[in-house]
Amino acid sequence: MRRPNIVVVMADQLAPHFTGAYGHPVAKTPHLDALAARGMRFDAAYCNSPLCAPSRFAFMSGQLISRIAAYDNASEFNASIPTFAHYLKALGYRTCLSGKMHFVGPDQMHGFENRVTTDIYPADFAWTPDWEAPDERIDKWYHNMQTVKESGIAQATFQIDYDEEVGFAARRWLFDVARDKAQGHDSPFALVASFIHPHDPYVARPEWWDLYTDADIDLPQFVPAQDDQDPFSRRLMDGIEASYVPLTEEEVRRARHAYLANVSYFDSKVGLLVQTLQEIGELDNTIILVTADHGDMLGERGLWYKMNFFEHSARVPLVMAGPGVTHGTAKNACSLVDLLPTFLEIGGGGPDMLGVPVDGRSLMPLARGEHDPVDEAIGEYCAEMTPYPVVMIRRGPLKYIHCDADPPQLYDLDKDPHETVNRTTDPDYADAAADFAAEFDARWNGEDLRVRVIATQKARRALHAAMEAGAGEHWDYDPPSDASQQYVRNHMDWTAAASRYRFPPNKDSNR
């Protein structure tokens, strides 16, 4: 039997809480809901770092960010790090990336055979933070409350332009695969289609905005007083201006309205790709996986965007459907580093082909409805608005958050899903808190990791200054295009070109 194809549809900044598949009462996500209705919904899936580039590098490599020095949005993704795209290509898969992956550095492929769009963000070291000045805002690229205040409706934005290109390019690549198959070139394929929505700015086209009314939009469920915020949350609030730029209830509601609208827009892209797989006859032999790089607080706890390990920021949707995947829900904690070994198992590979150790395990046992003894997700945050690494351990119902600069936090998500009570001083959780603290000391050296992070920051800032002065070429990806070989050209037979592009092929084309 032919090995299954793999199609990953990735959102940016999508918290599962705001989808119909995960129980939101008004979110309109019919295509994600349909996949969940015939596949597996993972209910405790996490990113490994709640920031775009680090999360994506962990997703691609199956390794935690401290292992590969993927600290922030300007960290280089080293070309010597094997990714699932490398392994799948070695297993005979055709591989393609359409859309965002926030690769930083001169290697803009990282194992993909084809890359059919540029990226939406810069590929250089411009966004390097400074841990020696953790309270300093970099206004050019730090999030702020003006983004929330400007939420609303528009006919076009740079994000809409980008996602339209990503969807079109992914769909065209799938048709090219089908055309090649019709010519006898039959290989399994792996496509990652990575969209920017529903990432802020919270601006939506009218047809998606109009799916919801103001009465539909709920407000944040838990917002502690500013004096009751934990120290890291207070730093985040200062960094994004939330501590001193007030928002009205109407502004919060508009932002959440636009976010839901853009969740529905992203869902339409899921539907577009499912439809395309149906049209090329590959739906029944394709494992489709929908996920995101991290979530969005959307005002919960008084926070916005991501950069923390509370549920709305750190949890991601993870829905898988296709051959061999049963229908159900998986309660075990898991994370994006688990997807590399998952893809290897789907593709017929195994641990023996790994070039380096990975930090995840295959999720196929859970996808098949089998028992999995592992119930754990690990997260690390080493980017802006903190002077030390922040670490999360989610095991069973408990979540532990540690930063050397702050008091530890411990939450029981079964009893307290909104994380309202820090249990570290609760006598009933004393043993668990002590065990987690000991585990942190055994697995991480916060001071040593801080030194390593600061060293890379200094090096990257120096290199960026030199590059700004003209040292070297830019790394932004420019998709190759040869117009002389596209559509119909003088060296081609017009009827042969028409026959090549037509899908399904005309059965009478040889007459």
Image (cartoon, helix red, strand yellow):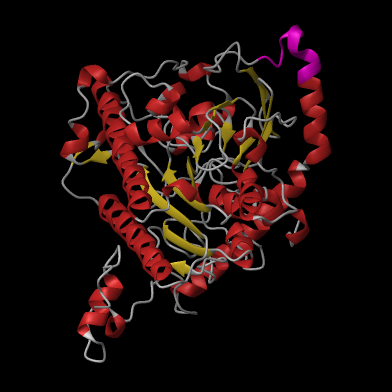
Q: Is residue 413 magenta?
A: no
Residue 4: x, y in percent? 54, 52
Relative to 491, residue 160 above or below: above
- Along the line of sight, the residue nearer the viewer: 449 or 158: 158
Left or right of 462 on screen, residue 69? right
Q: Is residue 431 magenta?
A: yes
Region in magenta? 423-432
User: Can you name the residue that lies furthest to the top here?
Assistant: 427
Q: At x 57% / y 13%, what residue is drawn?
A: 416
Residue 88: x, y in percent? 60, 61
Q: At x 63% / y 19%, what residue is drawn?
A: 411
- Along the line of sight, the residue nearer the viewer: 287 or 101: 287
The secondary structure that most of the magenta stretch takes on is helix
Relative to 207, residue 74 above or below: below
Q: Quadrant of residue 501?
A: bottom left
Q: Is residue 244 visible?
A: yes
Q: Quadrant of residue 146?
A: top left
- Along the line of sight, the residue nearer the viewer: 108 or 500: 500
Quarter that holds the C terminus: bottom left
Q: At x 52% / y 56%, what residue is drawn?
A: 128
Residue 256: x, y in percent? 31, 28
Q: Is residue 15 visible?
A: no
Quarter that holds the N terminus: bottom right
Residue 373: x, y in percent? 75, 29
Q: Quadrant of residue 391?
A: top right
Q: At x 59% / y 66%, what residue is drawn?
A: 92
- Along the line of sight, the residue nearer the viewer: 246 or 220: 220
